[in-house]
Structures are given as structure tokens and as C-alpha cells.
Amino acid sequence: MLNHPTLDQLKTMKLSGMAAAFEEQLQRTDLSDLSFDDRLAFLVEREHAVRSNRQLTYRLRRAQLKLNATVEDLDHRTRRGLDKATLNELARCRFINDHLNVLITGPTGVGKTYLACAIAHSACRNGFSARYLRVPRLLTDINVARGDGTYHKLLAQLAKTDLVILDDWGLATLNAEQRRDLLDILDDRHALRSTIVTSQLPVKQWHEVIGDPTLADAILDRLVHNAYTINLKGESMRKKHANLTHPDHSAQ
């Protein structure tokens, strides 16, 4: 009779993992040989697993990753210049503890965004916060935030995020205000947080795209000199995986 009040109390305290495990114990007849410590450990482990999964779900939702990508699902059959040793190192997320950056370059469709999201997914699994951002939209959002008074709040949110993805870097030359905005973001993160940048342009061309030589030096100094650099190669993965109809088939 004492079991039901205990179950109710666990649910009242929002210990849903322990409550589920306790219900299972009540229904099983093969646990009589287990000690009190073993049965308690089983309850605690279940609660820990439930909370960990809940926290991971929360971090992934906040990250707003463009793709549901994982390191385990990366395609290694296609040669793209992706070194497994480097990938495994990044998946361990020690680069985030060391406040290092990751620069991923290569032609369109080669898998830059997927790789960036896969690394960010590993970061979330390892307890870090992450955020995916496309640079063109970010610059627009910053401009809007400056107008509605939330500019400093937006920068503060980015500054405290463990890992930020800046996708589609260098699609257009920056204007003076955009250069200053990116410098502010990267200066807040320099040596404190980690940033992943993806770009179709090789790093050596970033200086020109930023525009102003002085600000370009300042921005790249905060990105390049403490970063892993991955240069992906090959044909577009979208083209490879597209289910295209052969012209001869369409004529049938």
C-alpha cells in the first residue's frame, strides 16, 4: 500500500524518470535478489537519463540547426578532403574548451553546412550551447535589432553561446556597418567562445570580401589564427544524391 503514495510523490516532485523506473520495479518479480543500493541506483540512473535527454532536446531546440546532422552519419565514401582524425577530434569538442574556431571552406553543395551542424550536434550532446546563423540573415536581424532597441541583448546572447555557426560567410562584400557588427560579435567571443564559419571562398579571399583593410585585419585576426581549417572538395552532394530522371526514361 505504501508503493502508490511513493509513486505519487515522485511524480509530484517531477521525478518522472524515477517514477517510471519505480513502476517497472513494482511490476517485475525478478528483482528480489537485488540489494536496496542496486534498486536505488537503477532509479537514479533512469532519472539522470531522462534529465539528460530533456536537456539535450532543449539545447538542440535553442541551437536551431539548419540540418539534423550527426558526425556518425557523415558520408566518408566520397573523397572530399575530410580527415577522419580531425573530425574525431572536433567531435570530442575539446576545441570548445580551448576556445578554438573551425573554418570550413569549399564549393557549393559539398557538405559544409552539414559538417558544421554535425559538429554543433556533438557540442549539444556534450553539454555545450550552440546556435546556427546564416550570415546574410544575421546581418539583417542585427540591423532590425538596432532599430527596435534589442541590439545589445542580441549581442549578449551570442557572446555567451558556447558555439556559434556563421554559415554562408562571404556571399557579398560587407558595408561599413556590417563590418563593425561582425567585429563586435567576434571580439566578444575571441578567446572565450568558439565559432564555426562556412564559406564558398578560400580563407585567403576573405580579406577582400570584408572590404576595409583595417577592419578585415581585426576580424580575421580573431578568426583565423586560432582555428582548425577544413577545405572540402569534390562535386555537389546535392547533385550526387538527387533522384534525377534520365532523359531517355522521360521519353518513354
Image (cartoon, rainbow, N blue to C red):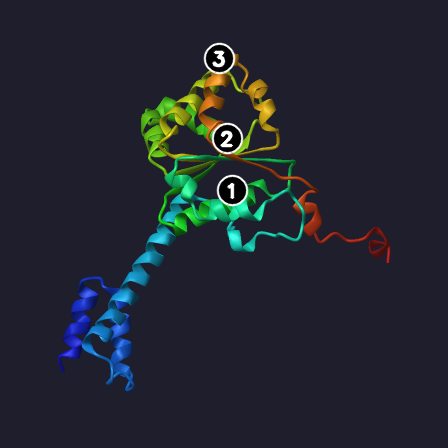
- Callouts 3 and 2 close, C-beta under 8 Å: no
The reply, left or right, for residue 186 in relation to residue 198 is left
Q: Amino acid at mark 2?
A: Val
Where residue 214 is drawn, which disc sits there? 3
Instruction: Find disc 1 in the rendering and name its residue.
Output: 116
Decide which of 28, 8 is in the foreground and name it: 28
- Badge 2 crowding class, 10 Å Cα cut-off, few under 14, some 14 to 19, many 20 or more, is some
- SS at mark 2? helix
**Tag nearer the camera, 1 or 2:** 1
- SS at mark 1? helix
Where in the figure is residue 197, as x and y percent of width and height?
A: 51, 34
Where in the figure is residue 110, as x and y percent of width and height?
A: 64, 42
**Which badge, 3 or 2, comes first in the chain's sequence?**
2
Decide which of 90, 43 is in the foreground and name it: 90
Instruction: Find disc 2 in the rendering and name its residue.
Output: 135
Instruction: Measure the C-alpha gap from mark 3 to mark 1.
Output: 28 Å
- SS at mark 3? helix
Q: Considering only vertical position in the picture, is 101 above or below 214?
A: below
